């Protein structure tokens, strides 16, 4: 199944199973790319947030007019910050951004319990790597990419290029078939040759 893509300088559509790496400056404004990705040609989506709480994710979706009825959110921060939280049908919690097994399990449950066109946004690899070992994070990404393949879904993975050294950025880039590179001026370059 193909998914329409609302990203400038990118193909009009991508096949299910595609994971896209979104490279951005540490201060880069990724919300527009992220929300356009989530609201285009989508039946259900999961936001895995290691950078903001579920409440902040909801505010972003509302601000960019994304249909929250289709949304599930995985909040990895609130419990670690000491807020007591109970999961609901569409908001899930794990203990911290380095609970990689918990994150993988929620993503698997989301893909197994939904149908149609599914998208995942993981915002961000950088925060996850701050809490967990980078090699473990790369292993998690490989498993998530396998899940996309198995379930004909697509995903956008955020990585702040200014925070990691070049070698680590290259290692993360090597996992993906497609890269969207956002520069400080908001210009977008893309490479979808592997798709």
Image: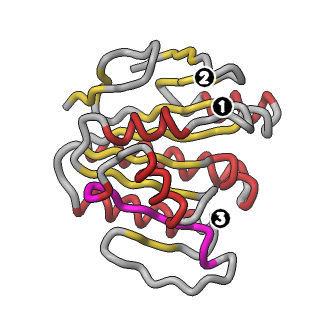
**Which segment is the magenta one?**
69-79
Closer to viewer: mark 2 or mark 3 = 2
Query: Separation of disc 1 and disc 2 at Cα?
Result: 6 Å
> Residue 192 placed where, x, y %?
45, 17
The question of residue 159 being in magenta is answered with: no
SS of the residue under disc 3: loop
Which residue is at the front of the view, 85 or 172? 85
> Residue 98 placed where, x, y %?
65, 64
> Which residue position is annotated with label 3?
98
Label 1 or label 2, whichever comes before in sequence order = 1
The answer to whether mark 1 and mark 2 are in CB contact below 8 A is yes
Q: Quadrant of residue 4?
A: top left
Label 3 or label 1, whichever comes before in sequence order = 1
Label 2 or label 3, whichever comes before in sequence order = 3
Horizontal relation, residue 68 to residue 7: left or right: left
Query: Separation of disc 2 and disc 3 at Cα?
Result: 25 Å
Horizontal relation, residue 31 to residue 132: left or right: left
């Amino acid at each position: 199944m193909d998914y329409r893509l609302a990203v400038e300088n990118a193909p009009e559509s991508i096949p299910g199973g595609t994971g896209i790496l979104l490279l951005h400056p540490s201060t880069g404004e990724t919300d527009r790319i992220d929300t356009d990705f989530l609201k285009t040609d989508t039946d259900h989506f999961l936001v895995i947030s290691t950078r903001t709480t579920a409440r902040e994710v909801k505010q972003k979706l509302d601000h960019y007019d994304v249909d929250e009825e289709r949304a599930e959110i995985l909040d990895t921060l609130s419990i670690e910050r000491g807020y007591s939280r109970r999961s609901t049908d569409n908001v899930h919690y794990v203990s911290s951004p380095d609970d990689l097994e918990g994150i993988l399990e929620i993503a698997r449950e989301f893909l197994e319990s939904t149908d149609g066109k599914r998208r995942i946004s993981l915002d961000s690899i950088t925060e996850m790597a701050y809490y967990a070992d980078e090699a473990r994070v790369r292993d998690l990404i490989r498993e998530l990419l396998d899940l996309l393949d198995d379930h004909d879904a697509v995903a956008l993975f955020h990585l702040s290029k200014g925070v990691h050294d070049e070698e680590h950025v290259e290692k993360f880039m090597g996992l993906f078939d497609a890269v969207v590179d956002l520069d400080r001026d908001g210009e977008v370059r893309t490479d979808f040759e592997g798709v």
